[in-house]
Amino acid sequence: MSLAVRTGADPMSAVTAVTSAVHEVDPETPVTDVLSMNELISNSLSPQRSNMLLLATFAALALVLTAVGIYSVLSYAVRRRVREIGIRMALGASHCDVLKMVVVDGIKPILLGVGLGLAIALGLGRVVSSLIFGVRPTDPLTFAAVASLLVAVGVLATIVPAYRATRVEPVRTLRDE
């Protein structure tokens, strides 16, 4: 049996009075597990909180792995294209042109991945809706925020390899040819 009591003051300060009132009615009734409503709600939401914490941890790990992967692939691509970049710069390409070339090459797969991810997330939104409290499975603000975050991380991961590409020395590249 459960008993709910509303008080105007601190709920835990009324425990002794409520326990005394219960014992006046029936001295054999034990009074155990006295909780405030905030504690009761917190206990009932604990499984969802732990699920969301686990999901957020995996999402953060996936974001870090994504950034490292994009950085690694673009660094490798820039290293393989050092001669091409050097020749382009020797023929008059500016640092801005080289930077733009590398960033655009990096952004294309990022935008494709975000587009595919949004399509899959819309399809699977109903599956994870039981884990998300207070957010609709097709919330446009959430999708826009996550897509923007992923694109921003992708752009940041492309900047270092693109910057390194602008540091290629055309004279040295032509000597190696």
Image (cartoon, grey):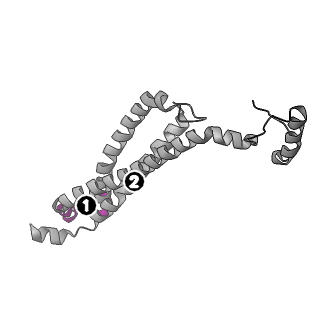
6 shown above or below 76: above
Magenta-highlighted residues: 85-97
Q: Is residue 81 visible?
A: no
Q: Earlier in the sequence, mark 1 or mark 2?
A: 2
Q: Please rate how many residues cluster around mark 2, counting C-alpha atoms within 10 Å: few if below 14, some from 14 to 19, many from 20.
A: few
**Left or right: 162, with 146 as reference point:** left
**Left or right: 135, with 37 as reference point:** left
Q: Which mark is residue 93?
A: 1
Toward which corner of the image does residue 93 lie, by quadrant? Answer: bottom left
Q: Name the residue nearer the viewer: 132 or 46.
A: 46
- Dominant secondary structure, magenta: helix
What amino acid is found at the position of numbered circle 2 in the picture? Val
**Left or right: 160, with 60 as reference point:** left
Q: Residue at x 85, y 48 (%)?
A: 13
167 shown above or below 64: below
- Determine which residue is flagged by label 2: 64
Q: Name the residue nearer the viewer: 133 or 70.
A: 133
Find numbered disc 1 in the image and state the secondary structure of the residue it sits on.
loop
